[in-house]
Amino acid sequence: MSQTEVTYQKKELPAKLNKIGLILLAVGVALGVLGFFVDHTRAIFNYLLAYTFLISIGVGALFLVTLEYVTNADWSVPFRRIVEIFAGIIPFLAILVIPLLFNMHDLFHWSQKEVLATDKVLAGKAPYLNVPFFIIRVFGFIGIWFLFYFFLFRNSLKQDKTGNQNLTTINIRISAIFIPVFAITLSLTATDWLMSIEPHWFSTIFGVYYFSGTVIAALAAVTLAVVLLREHGYFDKRITNDHLYSLGALMFAFVNFWGYIAFSQFMLIWYADLPEETSWFIQRWAGNWAIFSILLIIIQFLVPYIALLSQPSKMNPKRLKFVAIWLLFAHLYDLFWIVIPSMPGMEKGYIFSWIDFVFPIAIVGVVILIFNMLAKRVNLMPIGDPKIKRGLDFHL
Amino acid sequence: MNNGRKIFGVSALFNKPDDIINAAKIVAGKGYTEWDVNTPYPVHGMDDAMKIKPSKLGFVTLFFGLCGTAFALLLMWYTLSVDYPLVIGGKPFFALPAFIPVTFELTVLFATISTIIAMLIFFFGLPRNNHPLHNTDYMKKVSLDHFGIVIEAADPKFDEYKINELLKSLNPVSTAVIYEKEKVRYPIFEPKFITFLILIAVVVSFGTYLTLNKLMYITPFSWMDEQEKITPQSKSEFFSDERGMRLPVEGTVARGFIPYPFMGVEIPDKYLSNPFIPTEENLTLGKKKFLTFCSPCHGNFGNGDGRLRGQFPNPPSLHSTRIRNFEDGRIYHVMTNGKNVMPSYASQITRDERWAIVNYVRVLQRAENASDSDIEKIQ
């Protein structure tokens, strides 16, 4: 088809974006600190779920970047830079983790020495679940992700200036190494941060379950950014609804994947009916938690499934915007459903508290700030990529 | 020139996918309706160029998929929780999580099969088994390395000369007029087609037979055939007595088993008392068991005139005064322990059933020797 030149003019993001981000972050942090003094445990559990949500977006975005490289995809090249910017959350994870590490005793009762002395099961798990090794893992994984992010992003930026095709080849190699590393690190991250809140319970599929949510969150964030930026003309005009269709189809696929994995986890545990495995689901069926569990199916699976089922709906920017926001909320809700029922004091059912609504405000602020900061410095399209013309000419 | 044959349409061949998209755009712009494009592989952007509306086939798939969902759930609900409720793994009769995989499978099955059938009937026009374009030079080229476009004679704006001019203006490799072959009245009964169907049937049957009866039993697929477990009659290398079948632990009692204290005693000094009241239900059971186990020798009414007359010594009538004066426990003892040539029925008839038979025998005896007051009651 027509092989016209890429006509990309960098357009500054509006200045108010920075302001909005700062205000949201300030409000979130102020209320969060207040919440910390009002109800210490509740605040730290909410901080944990907010933190894992940021891992989802950051590391999930890095996975999407590498996925594009290893599959040699054309269609996603024009907005790969957006995905790379979202992966820019990764270095900040190392700073944001610090409040959690100082409050580990509230989160994880395997970290308390008194518990280990009386609890044989936890004593048996101690070679893996102990504080020094946990901290090594946390920073080790962030370090590994950062290295991959750093080299991929650096090469991609270099290509903007030089157009050197070899950089793509190098990035494909880095990506091929990253994917198995990602599988292991993300599974262990899910085990460390989410599964070990209830250290007696275990589910071998849990890492995959978290992975499915991770990709949904990252895709939703990317879709939302792409639709908004395209609406306001930050991209080449040749990004068509066909590109959006591919994003929508991927989201649809991962919504199905989430449903499949979540149901597999539930059905196997329900069918085998072993006390050491069912405890987790019984807790999530206690009192009004049952309503939350049913809502999870509706929010995370049924609504996005129906919203994305038909072909035109995957191409409709308005629909995609709605679904992207919905899915970001759904992943947050999924994490809420994983973390909060395990909190001490929640055994009989959910007890309302304003603290639960504080941290999502801060997350939105943090993501906007990081996005704005990185987007200011770089082109929003990888203009030096050898595949960008084919990517722009993509048609279904 | 046309040898009296009917024109099917005018075709043009192109070399490059860009050319065919351009041609499709122009032909669609001229307002033709009955035309089509043939390419060796799917060309991206063709739907837009041809101004094709999205296919309606998806709705057929959705509708029948939902039918499959409803059918699966209704089927499992009716069979497993209404008609024949069975406790499986301690789960509730309507165990939704266990039904989900089946529901999913049936949804997919209904959706795919209905899609294929709808495609064959509505989109391919099923009785038609061929298309005029098949077996033409045009089709041979577009399935190899050319991109073709055909405007059919069925189009209301069809004009051979004009269309030829239009297509030639698009710089094609070549243009040609395609003629229809003689119409066959019933294409489905064409010998070639029938032979083809039979061939498919034979291949599919043979393939299925081979897979299910032979291939499944070749070593790498037959893991389930060779198992580590020891079957009851096989030799065990683990136990010192080399028996695969183990004896139950000493003192093991079967569930519901109640020991009989006078087993093996010819005439005990006392008998058990009858624990059952002769209700209608109990007597119905007794009648059924009596007719099954006792009547071959004792006869349907206990007269000693059974169907086996001559092959075994005749048992005495159950209506003699001596037997009528037996306690219930004594009749029970005879059934449990056996008497003379009559063997023990303890292993064939359960304890409760034997007592039910006793009650039924009492009914027979009373009916045979009914007093006048009994008859008055009935009247």
Image (tube, rainbow, N blue to C red):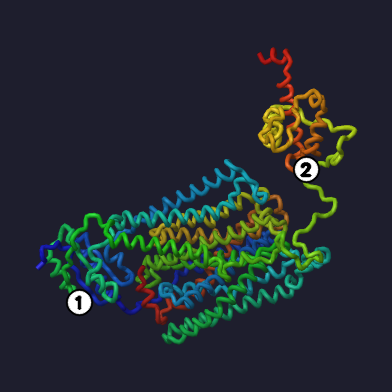
State left or right for residue A109 relative to residue A305: right
Q: Which mark is residue B173?
A: 1
Instruction: State the SS at label 2.
Output: loop
- Residue B89 or residue B231, whichever sits in front: B231
x 51%, y 80%: residue: A153
Q: Is residue B33 above or below residue B135?
A: above
State left or right for residue A282 relative to residue B101: right
Residue A272: % across, % down? 67, 57
Q: Is residue A387 above or below residue B6?
A: below
Residue corresponding to mark 2: B256
Q: Quadrant for the N terminus of chain A, please.
A: bottom left
Q: Which mark is residue A265?
A: none
- Residue A204 or residue B25, whichever sits in front: A204
- Residue A241 or residue B347, whichever sits in front: B347
Q: Is residue B217 above or below residue B277?
A: below
Q: What is the three-letter code of the residue carrying label 1?
A: Val
Rendered image quadrant of residue B347: top right
